[in-house]
Amino acid sequence: MASDHYDVILIGTGPAALGAAFHLSDHLPALSLLMIDRERICSGGLLNDCKQNYSYPIGFAEEYWTREEAERLLPLVEQKLQPVFKTQHNIDVYRRRAERIGATLYDIRQAHVGTDRSKLLIRRLMDELVTRGVRIMLEREVTDIREESSGAEVTLDNTERLRADRVIVAPGRKGFGFLQQVMERSGITYIDNIVDVGIRVETTLDNYPIVRDYYDPKFYFPDGVRTFCTNSGHARVVLERYQDFSIVNGHALSAERTGNNLVNFALLKTIGLKAPVRSGHQMALFLGRLAHEIGGGRPLMQRVGDFRMGKRSTAETFNDDLYSFRPTCPVTAGDLGLAVPAKIMRHIWAALKKLDTIIPGVLHPSTIMYYPEIKMYANKPTFIDHHFRVSDHLYMIGDGAGTSRGITGAWASGIRAAEGIVQALG
Ligand SMILES: Cc1cc2nc3c(=O)[nH]c(=O)nc-3n(C[C@H](O)[C@H](O)[C@H](O)COP(=O)(O)OP(=O)(O)OC[C@H]3O[C@@H](n4cnc5c(N)ncnc54)[C@H](O)[C@@H]3O)c2cc1C
């Protein structure tokens, strides 16, 4: 076999591609596998914070997954990631309080690695794949994929061409544009009609003490609002660059690190778009750019106390007052009301008030609301089989293709695609 030809090329080294690579090399060890990533180390949640949720439906796109299917694959994910599970306390108390006001608390099996230790996990996984003979090319960007009669041609950095019998495309959320470009060129139809828009809340541990009982509590509120990605211990809000603007996110270091006594979590509203609006991605860009404009080139932050009084926050609001704390991500102090569409803000605020009833304190005047936090991952191709195949030789998986919304769901998607290849070749 020529060195530029592989049985399977995997684009990306995130959890979706890793799940596929491990499954393929477990079941068909003689296959030649190549993984390609434009980054030096795989990106996303495996690298940042790395909370792993092992309970359906967290992290799974429910339209493609049944509970049974997810629960069949989650033990396989667990075998490879070897999570150390967090213990949880008093869940029934919180759950009863939530149910009384029309909210739901999911009881999730969870593990947390922490941003400072996640690189070790990634290194262990990559080393194991290399030992099995998987070739890994980092800092190389796939710029094109073209289907051919007997396989597909993959172009690297607009110059080098490689061939494979099958290609698994797992470029994550940041590969959104790339995935669309490949689908359009290959005549693969897709829809992009969902987007999550919301805020990141930052407060003190004392104002959100539930995290002492439950590391990342998953509350679901009416109107499609949910808590997401809670960080505590040594927790920080961070900026994530997306095209020409920044959005906010959060992460935390491992439990071994000294805490800063702060907590952050996202409160996201899922928006399902209907005709005539066609693209969740376009809507996200529009909202992101509006916030960027109003924030003078940066996201916005506002104290709850100011928001309640209907006035903008100013730099002076973020001081060392006795009842206050400094933001971990000092962006532009301002007025969220100018940037967040009214309906989204109304639903998020209603959810925050319910959350404050379940965990009194979270709506303390010092609590900070950052905006925008946006999740752009709903780029859903038309799949032609159960294994996320989109054409004769291409599979599309992970957050970029809308089959998952988290590390474990992405990994399970990789296994599902690999099972299709094993069936076809085995
Ligand atoms: C800051 C942050 C924190 C998060 N925290 C968590 C968490 O704690 N728990 C959780 O469950 N989820 C978390 N997530 C979500 C989680 O990262 C994703 O659900 C998961 O990583 C999706 O896996 P994936 O393999 O589909 O994509 P990714 O993990 O994004 O991997 C895609 C890979 O493809 C590469 N790539 C893209 N395009 C190309 C190209 N053209 N050529 C070559 N390579 C390319 C990228 O560099 C990337 O490494 C977080 C996300 C972010 C951004």
Image (cartoon, rainbow, N blue to C red):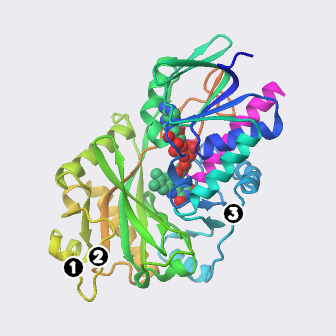
Q: CA distance from mark 2 to mark 1?
A: 6 Å
In-front residue for pair 420/115? 115
| Rendered location of residue 77, percent (x, y) | 71, 52
Q: Is residue 421 magenta?
A: yes
Mark sitting on residue 326: 2
Which residue is at the far top?
A: 149
In the rendered structure, which amino acid carries the disc numbered 3? Pro
For the residues bearing labels 2 and 1, Cβ distance under 8 angstroms: yes
- Residue 284 drawn above or below residue 85: above
In the rendered structure, which amino acid carries the disc numbered 2? Arg
Specify whether residue 399 is in view. Answer: no
User: Dot 1: within a 10 Å radius of its alpha carbon, few (fewer than 14), some, or many (20 or more) residues?
Assistant: few
User: The residue tagged with tag 2: helix, strand or loop?
Assistant: loop
Quadrant of the frame with the C terminus: top right
Q: Which residues lie in the magenta part? A: 401-426
User: The residue tagged with tag 3: helix, strand or loop?
Assistant: loop
In the rendered structure, which amino acid carries the disc numbered 1? Asn
Q: Check disc 3 and report the residue beneath it.
A: 83
Which of marks 3 and 2 precedes in the sequence? 3
